[in-house]
Amino acid sequence: YAILSSGGRDRTHQQHYQDTLRYLLDKGASVNGMGMQGHFGRNPTSIERVHSILDRYHTSFPQLDIRITEFDVSTDDAELQADYTRDFLTIVFSHPATVGVQCWGFWAGAHWRPEAALYTKDWQIRPNGEQWKHLTREIWWTDLNGQSDAKGTFSGRAYYGDYMIRVRHNETIKELQFQIEKDDANRFEIQF
């Protein structure tokens, strides 16, 4: 905790986390990622500072992925909350070491800090929820449609993640589920 929160100023705790990771790796522990809690309040850590902290750990441990855990922004200022949610998700999504963001909760009826939830108790989406949905279901969402060339090849760009492709050849339809992964050729073939 307190790696990203508290304005990103808890350098003692940050150093302890870094030293602990280094110790575990030096002793041969099987560590394949870092988790960083993301609890923020009405004075959240600046996005520039978040980026700097992510860079620090990525530089120290380039072989480890970073996942943000327990993300929420606890404030009654809906505009600040929505803007910070948008900016935080964007900086995390754009960082080469990060692999995901998990909310600590999303519904006010079961959230430790109901004002931080993406949805109210009566399931109305809040402005921070709108930002989350807009980024993850519109901006960073891939829908591709197209036709293969004369050789039967189709290519396109897609975000990392899980996909289902549906291909029609004459009257035959085939489906394939697959993942687009970092550092992979990401080539898939469907044969008729």
Image: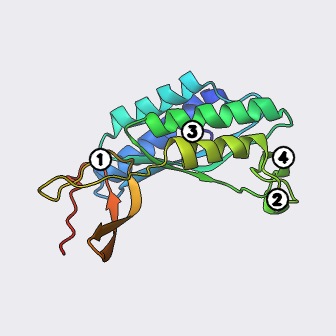
Please tell me which residue is depicted at 60% across the width and 29% down the height of the picture.
8
| Badge 1 amino acid | Gly
Please provide percent x and percent y for residue 25: 32, 51
**Quick check: 166 left or right of 170?**
right
Please tell me which residue is depicted at 28% across the width and 57% down the height of the picture.
28
Q: Secondary structure at mark 3?
A: helix
Please provide percent x and percent y for residue 121: 87, 58
- Which of the labelled discs sits on residue 115, or is there none? 4
Q: Secondary structure at mark 1?
A: loop
Decide which of tag 3 and tag 4 comes sooner along the chain.
Answer: 3
Name the one closer to the observer, 188 or 28: 188
In the rendered image, which residue does mark 2 sit on? 123
Q: CA distance from mark 1 to mark 4?
A: 40 Å
Decide which of tag 4 and tag 2 comes sooner along the chain.
Answer: 4
Decide which of tag 3 and tag 2 comes sooner along the chain.
Answer: 3
Q: CA distance from mark 3 to mark 4?
A: 19 Å
Decide which of tag 1 and tag 3 comes sooner along the chain.
Answer: 3
Up/down of 149 relative to 61, above or below: below
**One can see residue 44 in this view:** yes
Name the one closer to the observer, 38 or 147: 147
- Which of the labelled discs sits on residue 89, or is there none? 3
| Badge 2 amino acid | Trp
In the rendered image, which residue does mark 1 sit on? 156
